[in-house]
Amino acid sequence: MPGHVPGRERGSLARHIFAGLTGFSILAMVVFAVAAISMFYNSYETDAENQLLGQVRQTASQLDGKTAKEQKAYLESVPWSGLRCTLIEKDGTVSYDNQVDVSQLGNHSDRTEFKQAEENGESSILRYSDTLGQQTIYAAERLTDGSVVRLAETRHSLLSFLEGMLPSLLLAAALIVAVGFGLSRVLTRHIMRPIDRMDLSNPLNNDIYVEMRPLMQRISDQQNQLRRQNKELEAAVETRREFSANVSHEMKTPLQVISGYSELMQAGIVSQQDTAKFAGLIHSEAESMRALIDDVLTLSRLDESALGQAEISDVDLVWVAQQVADRLKTVADERQVTVELEPADEPIRVRGAETLLEETFYNLIDNAIRYNHPGGKVKVSFRTLERDGSNRVEFTVSDTGPGIPPEMRERVFERFYRLEEGRSRETGGTGLGLAIVKHTVQRYDGTVTIKDAPGGGSAFVVDLPAAS
């Protein structure tokens, strides 16, 4: 199924999940086992201490009221089963010990359990025995005559305790590993099942974990972005293909004219009188080709964002418009068209490349002159405004020509689009001027729209961010 997780990646993910779960489960079980052993050991110690305290109380009850001889006889008759029994006189002298020769024992009045029994009647402590050389639990009980009977039991260290439990611990460890391994395998399969079933071609339609929804959303967004980019790329490729075809077509006519007239001149069948005429036609067609090539190069550089980066500055639009109007005065006079610039109340400045903005004005004003009526007028006006919290600049180039139908106002910005076939060639245009205008304006985060001019004709309105 398309969009599924590939085998290698899936296996790697499953191994990582399995390893993580196995490690976690084994660690959790080990921690639990250690805690259980610790609790068991503590309980074992407590039970042993309580049991010893009960025994010493019972022993004390048997010794109370008896003579020293009777006490010794009783103590000797008891099977202590590894317990050490000591009878300490009131002054700390040891009178009986079932494991150590009393002559070798010093005074016990400084023993902690003896002092506590003297004060409280009984005591129970765990301490290191200098005599036995081991950790020992002591339980002591004071008799009515002030003497103290003491029972002692040596306690193994935790390590020794664990050594005694080693076979059981090894078995438990094996069970822990086996259970952890099996549990991890089951959980891994359960976790991977929805992932294996994912269809990445439709990420939001998957029945997946809630935690993975943001990831699926990002994948979906990226896929949509890629689709849009692919469509834009396809459109750009198609535009370039059409553009190349149109350039070839536009070049064909002047080349045919140049080739035809030059062949006639080369063959020597042109009269001297017509030679100058033919040379003029060849020159005119060559100029048309040059203008076309210049516009093609400008558009290409605009498409590649390679124009004007090092020339960015604050540009006075009123000054630029005046320079362009002066350049086009000859063309305007030939066509009997008047170009008028309305004065601005304040400086009109934008941030951009002066060469591009000059070409924008040139194409708009030249277009308004060439497609106007004899005796017509071209007006350039400026104004500043505020929109959405930012300062904007707006300039309008209007004419008194035939106008542009509303249904064609968007298409006139397309490359080589003509309202009438051959109209651009007849008026001297390349068919790329308005396309250059649109690309330049968009480059500087602006817009260009076409409206009806007062009294007829068209008005091209350009909106740009004002220079800060």
Image (spheres, grey):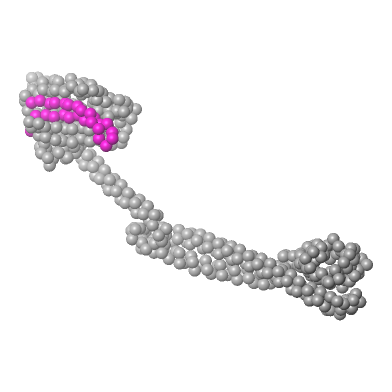
Residue at the farthest bottom position? 77
The percent coordinates of residue 314 (x first, y second) are: 30, 25
Indicate the quadrant where residue 131 lies. bottom right
Q: What secondary structure is the stretch in magenta mostly built from?
A: strand
The percent coordinates of residue 444 (x first, y second) are: 28, 33
Visible residue check, residue 116: yes
Q: Is residue 431 magenta?
A: no
Depth check: give the residue in front, 168 or 369: 168
Indicate the quadrant where residue 291 lies. top left
Visible residue check, residue 250: no
| Vertical order, 358 against 56 (above or below) | above
- Report the number of discs: 0
Q: Quadrant of the N terminus?
A: bottom left
Q: Residue at x 8, y 19 (%)?
A: 273
Q: Is 110 placed left or right of 339 in the picture? A: right
Span shown in magenta: 376-402
The percent coordinates of residue 465 (x first, y second) are: 27, 32
Q: Residue at x 8, y 26 (%)?
A: 376
| Vertical order, 271 against 232 (above or below) | above
Depth check: give the residue in front, 181 or 387: 387
| Vertical order, 298 against 329 (above or below) | below
Q: Is 279 placed left or right of 81 in the picture? A: left
Q: Residue at x 21, y 42 (%)?
A: 242
Q: Residue at x 53, y 60 (%)?
A: 20
| Vertical order, 453 against 148 (above or below) | above
